[in-house]
């Protein structure tokens, strides 16, 4: 397992920069190429555009293909733009089939054609098979490099077959058992092969406890299956029960990390593969779209405030206290929203228990509203020597926290139904709702009770 500690990556990047600045390129190259390809990819992603070009030139050609696979899509594109066609072809020709399938669509069109043309028929069929499935399914995730045995073979035959192979694919903890028509029968663990008599039949030791993974299962469900059953590898089958490939724990870890990064970036309206050192104009244009969307919601909240302009002019204290109502609602709603989005990702909530979750969050919102309404009402009443003002903001807080709880639960379900990522749009919608309801409740009640 590689060391992915971000602090270590930063230390290595600093050491590499120091070696490059001092002119010791050979030493820098040795240090760089002693790392795992994923660590080299981390260094490239943490480098500026100028540094990235210099670092890539030092990467051993034998490692280039594996490093390209590990890079984020946007950074990979910047690296590929600097490479000659022949260099790209040489980098990808020795990749594993599943890595090749992951990478090939990122390559320039001319390179894709030459790469496919240069493949032997079997390898081409394998790549085409993986590419025929969506990237976010078990089919797009699977590795076709598997070891299969027949149920009517003895362990002695299996052992001789394994010795003939010379080495096993990475993360092989069990062999796949298939019949002569390649239909999946079960698995045979390596410890069973090593600890039982060579005369034993495979059929007597087959394990059928773990269900094979359908090729159409989503990558999120695959990751959850591996987590729940502590799997190292699992077979993938088609609708007819034929064995297609296997998924290994290293691929699942990539899915989990990618999903975590995607959720964090989506909440800020950014792409999970965004290059931190992308050109300024490109980054500005991309972020401006999200800022524009937020500006629209801000104008909606401002319009609501404008409706009560006369009220605010007569009681300046309202303008001072308004942010409290909106802020408390926004924080409370964000807590609920984050909780529900996470639960959806883990498959913990659905139609069957959505109502129970809503009731629970409404109860929490009501209780929190009452608690903080008393605190804020007392502070506001004493601060401005106006008990009625304290009562107004207290009532508004209760209303807004209940609305925040309700919105935090319902928004993710509505967005999912509309096929929109809740992590991407949920925060903006929630902020708009809590701002509008908070200002409306606070200023509306103040208009009725204080003027």
Image (spheres, rainbow, N blue to C red):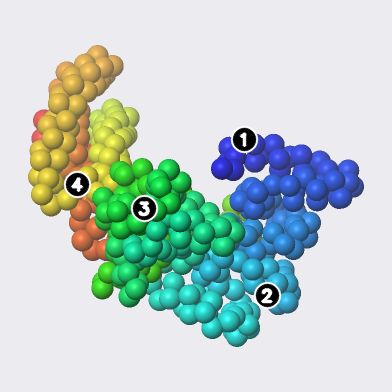
Q: Nearer the viewer, residue 313 or 238?
A: 238
Lower sequence index among marks 3 and 1: 1
Is label 2 in a helix, a strand or a loop?
Answer: helix
Residue visible at 68% across and 68% down in the picture:
91
Residue 417 appearing in the image: yes
Please give the label number shown on residue 89.
2
Label 4: which residue? 349
Closer to the eye: label 2 or 1: 2
- Mark 1 to mark 4 CA distance (whole Å): 36 Å
- Mark 3 to mark 2 CA distance (whole Å): 47 Å
Left or right? Give the position of 64 relative to 440. Answer: right
| Percent coordinates x, y for residue 396 in the rendering | 17, 33
| Percent coordinates x, y for residue 113 in the rendering | 59, 84
Is label 4 in a helix, a strand or a loop?
Answer: loop
- Mark 3 to mark 1 CA distance (whole Å): 51 Å
Closer to the eye: label 4 or 2: 2
Please give the label number shown on residue 200.
3
């Amino acid at each position: 397992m590689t060391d992915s500690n971000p602090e270590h990556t930063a230390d290595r990047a600093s050491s590499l920069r120091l070696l490059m600045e001092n002119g010791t390129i050979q030493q820098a190259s040795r240090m760089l190429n002693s790392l795992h390809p994923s660590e080299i990819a981390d260094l490239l992603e943490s480098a500026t555009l100028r540094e990235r070009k210099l670092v890539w030139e030092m990467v051993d050609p034998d490692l280039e293909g594996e490093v390209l696979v590990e890079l984020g899509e946007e950074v990979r594109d910047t690296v590929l733009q600097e490479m000659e066609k022949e260099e790209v072809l040489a980098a990808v020709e020795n990749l594993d089939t599943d890595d090749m399938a992951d990478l090939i669509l990122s390559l320039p069109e001319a390179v894709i054609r030459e790469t496919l043309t240069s493949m032997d028929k079997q390898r081409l069929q394998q790549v085409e098979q993986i590419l025929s499935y969506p990237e976010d399914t078990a089919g797009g995730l699977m590795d076709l490099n598997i070891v299969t045995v027949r149920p009517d073979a003895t362990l002695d035959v299996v052992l001789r077959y394994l010795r003939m192979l010379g080495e096993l694919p990475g993360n092989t903890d069990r062999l796949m058992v298939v019949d002569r028509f390649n239909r999946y029968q079960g698995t045979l663990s390596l410890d069973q092969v090593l600890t039982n008599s060579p005369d034993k039949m495979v059929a007597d030791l087959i394990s059928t406890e773990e269900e094979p993974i359908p090729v159409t299962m989503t990558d999120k469900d695959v990751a959850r299956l591996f987590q729940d059953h502590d799997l190292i590898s699992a077979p993938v089958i088609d609708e007819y029960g034929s064995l297609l490939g296997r998924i290994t724990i290293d691929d699942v870890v990539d899915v989990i990390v990618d999903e975590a990064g995607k959720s964090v970036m989506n909440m800020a309206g950014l792409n999970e593969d965004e290059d931190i050192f992308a050109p300024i104009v490109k980054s500005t244009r991309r972020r401006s779209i999200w800022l524009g969307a937020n500006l629209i919601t801000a104008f909606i909240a401002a319009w609501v405030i404008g409706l009560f302009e006369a009220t605010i002019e007569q009681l300046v204290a309202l303008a001072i206290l308004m942010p409290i109502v909106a802020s408390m609602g926004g924080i409370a709603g964000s807590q609920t929203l984050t909780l529900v989005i996470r639960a959806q990702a883990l498959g913990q909530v659905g139609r069957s228990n959505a109502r129970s979750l809503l009731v629970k969050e409404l109860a929490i919102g009501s209780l929190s509203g009452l608690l903080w309404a008393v605190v804020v009402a007392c502070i506001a009443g004493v601060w401005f020597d106006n008990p009625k003002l304290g009562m107004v903001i207290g009532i508004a807080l209760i209303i807004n926290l209940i609305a925040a709880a309700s919105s935090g639960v319902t928004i993710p379900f509505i967005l999912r139904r509309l096929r929109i990522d809740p992590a991407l749009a949920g925060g903006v919608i929630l902020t708009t709702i809590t701002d509008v309801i908070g200002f409306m409740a606070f200023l509306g009640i103040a208009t009725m009770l204080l003027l």
